[in-house]
Image (cartoon, helix red, strand yellow):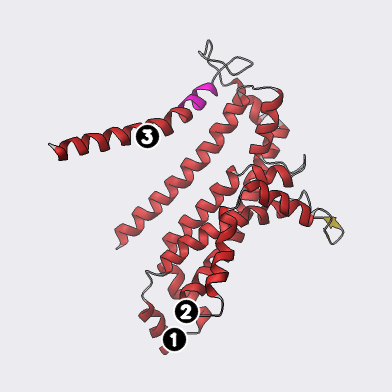
Amino acid sequence: MDAVMLRVLALAFTVFIIAYIAIPVIVTLVMSFNDASVIRFPIKAWSLRWYGDFFGSPQWVDALKSSVIIALGTTVISTVSGVLAAWAFERFTFAFKPVVYLLIMLPLFMPGVVLGLGVAMAFGDVSLFGVNIYGSRVLVMLAHSLWAMPLVFMLMEATFRTVDHRIVEASYDLGGRPVQTFFEIVLPSVSTGIISSALFAFVISLNEFVMALFLTTRDTQTLPVLMWLSLRSAGTPRLAVASVILAAAVFVSLSLIMVWYIRQLRKT
């Protein structure tokens, strides 16, 4: 009897969590097809009007483009640095290792407003080749990497622990150089972890708002920043369309992770 009650409670809790997550997404999706000029419920007329308005607006399309470019740059920066740092921690021993580990993980637990404001003050007057860094997409990529890189590092550190180091040592014994062994032996064996970490970094950057609010200008503002600014002036269903686009990017990324993971399981 106790086992049955436990299963019923677990099932009920699972259904509640799924509904709690799904309902806001479904409501947002439904509201994106509203033909009214403001967000209101119930919907009296259905239309694709606001999808056409979104993709016909240079300002919104440019914000989406900035978000994607920044997210891709963040993915490259955080994945490369996170993977190398995780391998170094797994493979080598060096002084002050716990302190370095703490410094790497620290930004992940810092509020976005603290990181955004700190980066803005630190690089507000810095120029590179005569170009002001503040307001550039590169600076936002670096700021977003403060969150994304520790996540990649944490995931890859756990992944590298699954590597059979006897294979690595065998490669060294056969004349393989460390760099060659890393790229030809180690990385292919942890490809699932790398893909997953990269996609998580992409999603984090794509949806990040607080740091982007401090670091972007009108020419480089991301989609979440533009959504917030538009919400303060007029809450049109265009905001629901933008939310659907961001949510779709998350679902696609998670789907790619699952597909890649299933394919790797089938190979083994």
Q: Residue 3: image x %, image y %?
A: 16, 40
Residue 172: numbered disc: 1
Q: CA distance from mark 2 to mark 3?
A: 44 Å
Q: Residue 97: image x %, image y %?
A: 53, 74
Secondary structure beneath label 1 = helix
The reply to whether residue 82 is in sight is yes
Count numbered badges in the picture.
3
Residue pictured at 69% horizontal, 49% vertical: 116
Residue most extreme to the top: 44
Q: The disc labelled 1 sits on which kind of residue?
A: Tyr
Is 217 contained in the magenta span? no
Residue pictured at 54% horizontal, 80% vertical: 94
Image quadrant holding the C terminus, namely bottom left
Compared to residue 104, the image places residue 134 above or below, namely: above
Image quadrant holding the N terminus, namely top left
* Among numbered discs 1 and 3, the one appearing first in the sequence: 3
Q: The disc labelled 3 sits on which kind of residue?
A: Ile
Residue for badge 3: 18
Q: Main secondary structure of the magenta part?
A: helix
Secondary structure beneath label 3 = helix
Which range is magenta? 26-32
Q: CA distance from mark 1 to mark 3?
A: 49 Å
Secondary structure beneath label 2 = helix
Q: Quadrant of residue 147?
A: bottom right
Nearest-to-viewer mark from 2 and 3: 3
* Among numbered discs 2 and 1, the one appearing first in the sequence: 1
Residue for badge 2: 181
Do tag 1 and tag 3 residues touch (Cβ < 8 Å)? no
Q: The disc labelled 2 sits on which kind of residue?
A: Thr
